[in-house]
Image (cartoon, grey):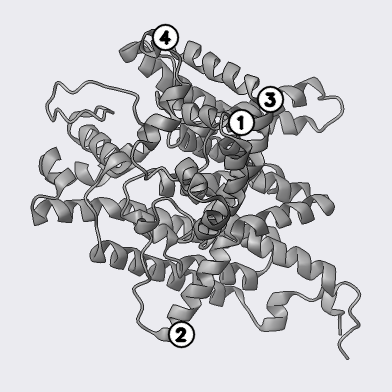
């Protein structure tokens, strides 16, 4: 017989293609059931970000205007407080139903309004199904194993992490969906038989991703830099690389240009959103913390037990530094970073002020990058700021409860496993895999450098990190099965 190192895992375990497809369908239906159960058991009234997105969706459905204004009249004016795609998706069910007034929706004053919000959550449920299918396709394309693909689908479809965000009207689930499929098609643009179609699709999904979370516009800029470099060095590389990159960035560039032109027309602001200042203000102020506060973060961000351990060695220092639930936290960590009379300054002047402050504390700014990468690695019930969003699974069987507890631990370790996977990928010089996971690396870098990197910011890359778990297993298997004697 063939050496075990050459055997296909699917052949060894008896997996076949029809069984895999049936498995994917069953897992997708399981995911739908979990999403529906989570929403049925607990659908909180929209608050903070959720209230903004529901308001944008309502105004889009009723007045065709992207705005967080609660005026609820035809006089509502456009704004750029929120990126438009999440609101657009949530507005789709509202366009085909007789929605109540905005106040009723936000407060869930009557059962009718609550039922209407339940219908809106189904947009998120559909996206979770697309994520589940995408995980199967990605693992299969990267490992060529139906066994690992089905194992990945089983793991994500039995998780309550994404279903817990179905009931939260925020941008996490749309961003996870667009980022996953953008990465799949980005890989396909260079390594599949349908490169042009994949490249164009990847660009369209990149546009959707940027208009869901504006921070990813810098990922597009990075791809533009790669395009320019490929043109400069076209004599040394395959010319098709330049054309492929052009197909990727063009749809995103045109779409973003259109949205920014809209903002300039209505608001005289050539920008994607106006929330960048407050985020960077908090990150800037962190560069002024003491080294003792900085060191305490490595204990404080340990999953599950970090706050108790940090308190033992640092007292109240880490909690006062990093816990944004404490009264006055925002004023303490955001407002001191703004320049005097910042209301009269332009956005570029404010960002320049933040940049100068970071340069003045460059040692602390650079030191905070690995700390916040460490913070953002851990996702799930252990570490998310909005931990109360994450519900227990709607199961009663004790074996399944034990399985979920094991899954919680796996989820908390996905970040470290991801970086182990990247180490193995670089060591094996598998540039295709590195390309697929490059948006995740960007996510860690941009958030650690310019935000306080809540664990919630890793929800969009959670499916990709789960894929990395199975890629890591496949790479480890290839390494350790090499040289095993033939089966007699």
Task: Please tell me which of labels 4 and 3 falls first in the chain.
Answer: 3
Residue bearing mark 1? 247
Q: Is residue 20 above or below residue 258?
A: below
Rendered image: mark on residue 225: 3
Depth check, mark 4 against mark 2: the one in front is 4
Depth check, mark 3 against mark 1: the one in front is 3
Rendered image: mark on residue 178: none
- Are the residues at dot 4 and dot 3 in contact (C-beta closer than 8 Å)? no
Residue pushed farthest left?
110
Distance Cα–Cα, label 3 vs label 1: 14 Å
Task: Please tell me which of labels 3 and 2 falls first in the chain.
Answer: 3
Q: Is residue 112 left or right of residue 426?
A: left
Question: Viewer-proximal residue, 345 or 432?
Answer: 345
Depth check, mark 4 against mark 3: the one in front is 4
Residue bearing mark 2? 399
- Crowding around mark 4 (Cα neighbors within 10 Å: few <14, some 14 to 19, many 20+) is few
Distance Cα–Cα, label 3 vs label 2: 51 Å
Residue in the picture at 58% in, 19% down:
357
Measured from the top left, where is residue 243 in percent x and y?
A: 69, 29
Q: Is residue 58 above or below residue 128?
A: above
Task: Please tell me which of labels 3 and 1 falls first in the chain.
Answer: 3
Measured from the top left, where is residue 472 in percent x and y?
A: 71, 62
Task: Please tell me which of labels 1 and 4 falls first in the chain.
Answer: 1
- Are the residues at dot 2 and dot 1 in contact (C-beta closer than 8 Å)? no
Residue bearing mark 4? 345
Measured from the top left, where is residue 13 in percent x and y?
A: 67, 82
Residue in the picture at 80% in, 68% down:
478
């Amino acid at each position: 017989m063939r050496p075990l190192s050459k055997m296909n895992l699917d052949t060894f375990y008896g997996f076949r293609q029809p069984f895999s497809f049936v498995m994917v369908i069953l897992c997708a239906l399981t995911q739908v059931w979990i999403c529906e159960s989570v929403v049925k058991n607990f659908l909180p009234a929209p608050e903070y970000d959720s209230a903004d997105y529901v308001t944008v969706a309502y105004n889009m459905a009723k007045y065709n205007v992207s705005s967080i204004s609660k005026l609820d009249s035809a006089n509502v004016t456009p704004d750029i407080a929120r990126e438009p795609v999440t609101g657009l998706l949530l507005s789709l069910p509202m366009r085909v139903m007789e929605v109540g007034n905005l106040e009723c929706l936000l407060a869930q004053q009557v059962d009718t309004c609550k039922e209407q919000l339940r219908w809106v959550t189904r947009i998120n449920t559909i996206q979770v199904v697309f994520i589940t299918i995408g995980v199967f396709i990605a693992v299969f394309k990267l490992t060529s194993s139906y066994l690992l693909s089905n194992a990945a689908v089983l793991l994500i479809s039995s998780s309550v992490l994404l279903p817990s965000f179905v009931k939260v009207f925020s941008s996490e689930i749309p961003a996870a969906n667009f980022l996953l499929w953008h990465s799949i098609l980005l890989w396909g643009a260079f390594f599949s038989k349908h490169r042009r179609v994949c490249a164009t699709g990847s660009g369209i999904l990149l546009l959707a991703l940027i208009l869901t979370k504006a921070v990813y516009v810098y990922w597009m800029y990075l791809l533009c830099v790669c395009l320019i470099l490929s043109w400069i060095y076209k004599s040394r590389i395959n010319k098709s690389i330049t054309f492929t990159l052009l197909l990727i960035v063009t749809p995103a560039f045109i779409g973003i240009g259109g949205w920014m032109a809209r903002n300039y027309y209505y608001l005289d602001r050539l920008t994607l959103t106006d929330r960048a200042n407050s985020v960077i203000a908090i990150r800037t102020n962190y560069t002024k913390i003491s080294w003792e506060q900085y060191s305490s973060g490595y204990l404080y961000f340990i999953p599950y037990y970090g706050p108790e351990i940090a308190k033992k060695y640092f007292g109240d220092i880490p909690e006062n530094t990093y816990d944004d639930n404490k009264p006055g936290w925002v004023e303490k960590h955001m407002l001191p970073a703004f320049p005097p009379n910042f209301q009269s300054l332009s956005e570029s002047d404010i960002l320049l002020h933040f940049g100068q402050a970071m340069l003045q504390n460059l040692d602390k700014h650079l030191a905070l990058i690995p700390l916040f990468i460490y913070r953002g690695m851990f996702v799930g019930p252990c570490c998310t700021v909005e931990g109360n969003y994450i519900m227990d699974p709607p199961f009663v069987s004790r074996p399944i409860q034990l399985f979920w507890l094991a899954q919680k631990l796996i989820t908390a370790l996905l970040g470290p496993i991801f970086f182990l996977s990247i180490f193995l990928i670089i060591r094996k010089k598998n540039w295709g895999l590195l390309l697929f996971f490059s948006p995740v690396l960007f996510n860690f870098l941009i958030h650690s450098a310019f935000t306080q990197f809540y664990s919630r910011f890793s929800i969009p890359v959670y499916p990709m990190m789960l894929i990395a778990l199975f890629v890591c297993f496949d790479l480890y298997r290839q390494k350790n099965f090499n040289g095993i004697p033939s089966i007699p």
